[in-house]
Amino acid sequence: MAVIHRTTVTPTKLELLTVWLPSRPWYRGGAAEPKLAKAGGFRLDDPQGEVGIEFMVVTDTSGPQPVTYLVPLTYRGAPLDGAEHALVGTMEHGVLGQRWAYDGCHDPVLVAQLAALIEGRVQAQAQSVSHEPDREVAASHTGEGPLPTDFVAADDQDGTRLTAPHGTTLHLHRVLRPAPDGPLPPSQGATGQVTGTWQLPDGTRARGVFAVLHTP
């Protein structure tokens, strides 16, 4: 399992995201610079132990109403070939040295592990504690057979859509919305989904849908 290092990162992840988020089509902010705060998230383990995988949840309070975003990130010790368009930025890690941070929807390691999470083959891990499962993240899958991993990612105003050659789609909700209290039913027509929790600006906890799977 991934080890969480207690060290410095320069620039910080929030500093990188402050520059990167406004370039996304699903960004809801205006002309003002985002004012970001960490609101939650979880990690997944890379079976090879090489790539850090984090699903960050951040809240932007720069506008009239707070907006919460889901930002899947991967951290690598060297550039990912062919993924220059997905680079969020580079940072200096106090233990691991220089790290390249990518929009994880374009990183095959994250996509494969997200599929494994939906299938129930792996478990979400706590964002800031080593060797600790995150039991607030729930995944479900009603389809048959293994999911593809050769998805192609595309952003639009509604979020990020991962599409496989035979029609399977995985939609990531980049703008998170709290669901009503009580168990979350599967999204209409979905064959799988991932739900999780985050902290609202008033300190209360919210639960909502992070990702929805549709298979033909």
Image: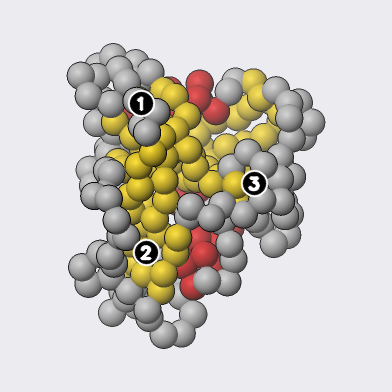
Q: Is residue 94 visible?
A: yes
* Percent x, y of residue 59: 37, 29
Labels 3 & 1 near each other (Cβ < 8 A) = no
- Residue assigned mark 2: 193
Which residue is at 72% across, 55% downward?
Answer: 1
**Which label lies toward us, 2 or 3?**
2
Q: Is residue 169 above or below residue 9?
A: below
Residue 183 versus residue 40: which sits nearer the camera?
Answer: 183
Identify the mark at residue 201; answer none if there is no mark: 1
Badge 3 density bin: few <14, some 14–19, many ≥20, Cα 10 Å: many
Which residue is at 27% across, 50% downward?
Answer: 181
* Percent x, y of residue 157: 22, 43
* Lateral position of residue 92 relative to residue 108, left or right: right
In the rendered structure, which disc, 3 or 1, sits on the residue that comes first in sequence? 3
**Which label lies toward us, 3 or 1?**
1
- Residue assigned mark 3: 52
